Image (cartoon, rainbow, N blue to C red):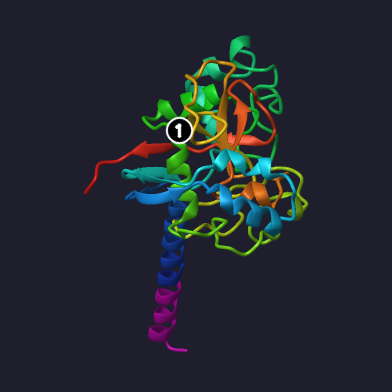
């Protein structure tokens, strides 16, 4: 092989490696961060007459599971951005480093249930869990984390708008097909614990784990249904959680499904992601 040809091969190999590295970097950058959504009007919730069909589809006689999402109503959300993934252990550790008042053992008793960051030892998360969603946090800690970087928790309406991914009538973030082990971390997957963020395919908006893995705190205090005005939040009030978790069933993974959790209730199945208000174009 001539020197000229060898040099050409070397150049192409270097160029390929450079482009691959650049592509990998771009892909890695795109995996985290936020997605900006232009907002819009959508129908949030479920009408009462549809509950019988939902009970039949999900093989349950518990109509009460669907009552909190009644009635269906039109909601308009303005432009906002939302995290591509749930906040991870590594993310939260960096926050605690900047704000030691949120370290284990530093949170006042009235703002937590005694289990705050109970899975951490010596001030850090378990080995190998850097990319696993943060859990054992409170609504107050989630709110403080988001606000520390100029963001906030998403509203319940923003969360549902984002989870739908532009699929107006779909039951799940990926469409109408039932969940399986390739779509989300839920009870049928058999993992029995949170797994690393982004393990499953994103929804059409590029958002990961909007169904399963861990439940997510949102800004709104809980009300029994959409027709009932929520109470003002105080430390022991319940707040809305969305998305289902590794222990949830198919009903919990629905984009319309609502549940609640104590604001101070640090637990192994609840985390969060952040949002940010944006200006309209």
Outermost left residue: 281
Neighbours of disc 1 within 10 Å: few (<14), some (14-19), many (20+): many
Which residue corresponds to the image point at 58% horizontal and 15% vertical from the top-left?
A: 111
Let me know if residue 212 appears in the view. Answer: no
Which residue corresponds to the image point at 58% horizontal and 53% vertical from the top-left?
A: 50
Q: Does 71 sit above or below residue 147? A: below
On the image, the x and y values in percent for residue 105 come to 64, 14
Disc 1: which residue = 153
Q: Is residue 250 magenta?
A: no
Which residue corresponds to the image point at 70% horizontal and 17% vertical from the top-left?
A: 114
**Relative to the observer, which residue lies in front, 190 or 166?**
166
SS label for mark 1: loop
Q: Does 8 sit above or below residue 32? A: below
**Relative to the observer, which residue lies in front, 35 or 3?**
35
Relative to 105, 225 lies left or right: left
Q: Please state the total of marks drawn on the protein image.
A: 1
Q: Does 161 sit above or below residue 148? A: below
Relative to 138, 250 lies left or right: right
Relative to 216, 145 lies left or right: left
Q: Is residue 4 magenta?
A: yes
**Relative to the observer, which residue lies in front, 149 or 112?**
112
Which quarter of the figure has residue 239? top right
**Relative to the observer, which residue lies in front, 169 or 204?**
169
Which quarter of the figure has residue 68? top right
Outermost front residue: 49
On the image, the x and y values in percent for residue 120 come to 68, 27
On the image, the x and y values in percent for residue 165 come to 46, 56
Which residue corresponds to the image point at 41% horizontal and 67% vertical from the top-left?
A: 19
Range drawn in magenta: 1-13
């Amino acid at each position: 092989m001539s020197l000229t040809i060898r040099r050409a091969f070397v150049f192409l190999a270097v160029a390929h490696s450079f482009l691959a590295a650049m592509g990998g970097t771009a892909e890695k950058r795109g995996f985290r961060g936020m997605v900006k959504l232009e907002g819009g009007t959508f129908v949030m919730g479920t009408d009462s007459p549809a509950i019988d069909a939902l009970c039949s589809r999900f093989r349950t006689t518990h109509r009460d599971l669907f009552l909190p999402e009644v009635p269906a109503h039109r909601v308009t959300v303005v432009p906002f951005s939302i995290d591509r993934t749930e906040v991870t252990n590594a993310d939260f550790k960096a926050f605690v480093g900047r704000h030691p008042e949120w370290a284990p053992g530093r949170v006042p008793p009235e703002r937590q249930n005694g289990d705050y960051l109970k899975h951490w030892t010596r001030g850090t998360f378990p080995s190998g869990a850097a990319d696993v969603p943060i859990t054992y946090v409170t609504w107050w800690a989630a709110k403080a984390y988001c606000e520390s970087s100029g963001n906030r928790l998403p509203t319940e309406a923003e969360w549902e708008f984002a989870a739908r991914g532009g699929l107006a009538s779909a039951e799940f973030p990926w469409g109408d097909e039932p969940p399986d082990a390739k779509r989300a971390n839920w009870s049928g997957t058999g993992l029995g614990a949170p797994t690393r963020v982004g393990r499953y395919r994103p929804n059409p908006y590029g958002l990961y784990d909007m169904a399963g893995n861990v439940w997510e705190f949102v800004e709104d205090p809980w009300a029994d249904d959409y027709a009932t005005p929520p109470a003002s939040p105080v430390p022991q009030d319940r707040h809305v959680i969305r998305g289902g978790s590794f222990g949830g069933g198919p009903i919990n993974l629905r984009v319309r499904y609502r549940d609640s959790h104590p604001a101070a209730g640090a637990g192994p199945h609840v985390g969060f992601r952040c949002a940010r208000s944006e200006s309209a174009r």
